[in-house]
Amino acid sequence: MKRVFSGIQPTGSLHLGNYLGALKRFVAMQDDHECIYCIVDLHALTMPHDPAGLAGATREAAAGFLASGLDPERCVVFNQSRCPMHTRLGWMLACLTPLGWLNRMTQFKEKAGKKRDGASLGLYGYPVLQAADILGYRATHVPVGEDQKQHLELSRDIAGAFNRRFGVDFFPLPEPVIAGEATRVMSLRDGARKMSKSDESDYARINLTDDRDTIARKVRKARTDSEPGVTWDPEARPEASNLVAIYAALADTTRQAVVDEYASARFSDFKARLAELAVEKLGPVGEEMKRLAADPAYVDGVLADGARRAHAIAGPIQAEAEEIVGLLAP
Ligand code: AQP
């Protein structure tokens, strides 16, 4: 059986981009794969954060995982800081990763901005910890959005570097699973920017916690152009094309099928239909999150059980890796 690992940071409200790029895939894979899904709270420390809010954000993200359809009986759901493998293996992999590889990472450049010298070592080493997240379970498949493609390539390079350095075939090279019609959901305010938790405008994204009225309002207010019809042309019509992709992903169809279906419709009518569809698909997720927010003991129990199961898988792999590098006598 293939082993799947993926994670999401508890850095703010989960949104439609996280849902279509990651969570929907996570759910689709839990039936026929062994799945391990992680709220990567250690990664959340790489940017300024509020210590008083982090544990709550982790719990809310876990509620988002469950409300989206993850079944804790069929997959492991836990938070990264509760399993010691991640940082231990992360250090071992950091000692094998050339700086030149990290210097190419575009996410670091974007997040560090102009003040690169002031950025933390943690932010710089983020993709090495991410490699440990994946390799520490010897995962073979990693469902992610398109923005994570470069980090996944680095994870493969690091796995290869470990295997070559110690003359072993220990870590499989993980395959990114970047699938679906909306692998890069764009902001509802600016078709050139990714939908993101950290966007200062709440109207740029649909949060999974938004209620039905808010979801519909955000879709109706989404920026579009003055072209009348529904077409797929991300170069010339980035905002309109983003909505076509969102529709296709939510309706489990293709962008071409959406364009064909709405070939003679006005864009405003298409938007009204998209608002209904988004409410139909996301409304119940937000409502379930609200129900789970009122039952924190249940969510904490899922995370504690997940941490125990994650550790049971990762512990022996970590021990074997420590033998390979010589920290442990065989
Ligand atoms: N806009 C997006 N479209 C498709 N997939 C997306 N993902 C994130 N944004 C989009 C996917 O969601 C998973 C978890 O991402 P993350 O929260 O760990 O990190 P991120 O990519 O940095 O997300 P944000 O929202 O942009 O967070 P901030 O604002 O904190 O940086 C990944 O699989 C990612 O591809």
Image (cartoon, rainbow, N blue to C red):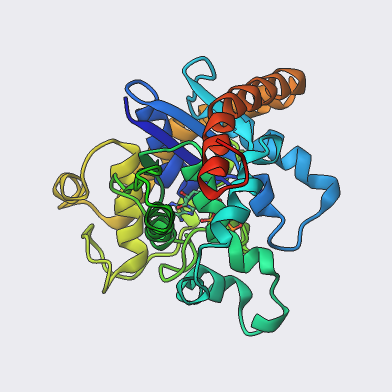
Q: Most extreme residue toward the right, as rendered? A: 52
The quadrant in which the C terminus is found is top right
Looking at the rendering, which quadrant does residue 115 occupy? bottom right
In this rendered view, identify the residue nearer to me: 236 or 305. 305
The x and y percentages for residue 93 are 54, 56
In this rendered view, identify the residue nearer to me: 205 or 183. 183
Where 82 falls versus 181 (above or below)? above
Q: Is residue 303 left or right of residue 215?
A: right
The x and y percentages for residue 161 are 41, 59
Look at the image and tell me whether residue 46 can be seen. yes
In this rendered view, identify the residue nearer to me: 122 or 264. 122
The x and y percentages for residue 160 are 37, 55
Looking at the rendering, which quadrant does residue 162 occupy? bottom left
Q: Most extreme residue toward the front, as rendered? A: 329
The x and y percentages for residue 21 are 41, 47
In this rendered view, identify the residue nearer to me: 321 or 295. 321
Counting every numbered tag in the picture gives: 0
Where 105 falls versus 127 (above or below)? below
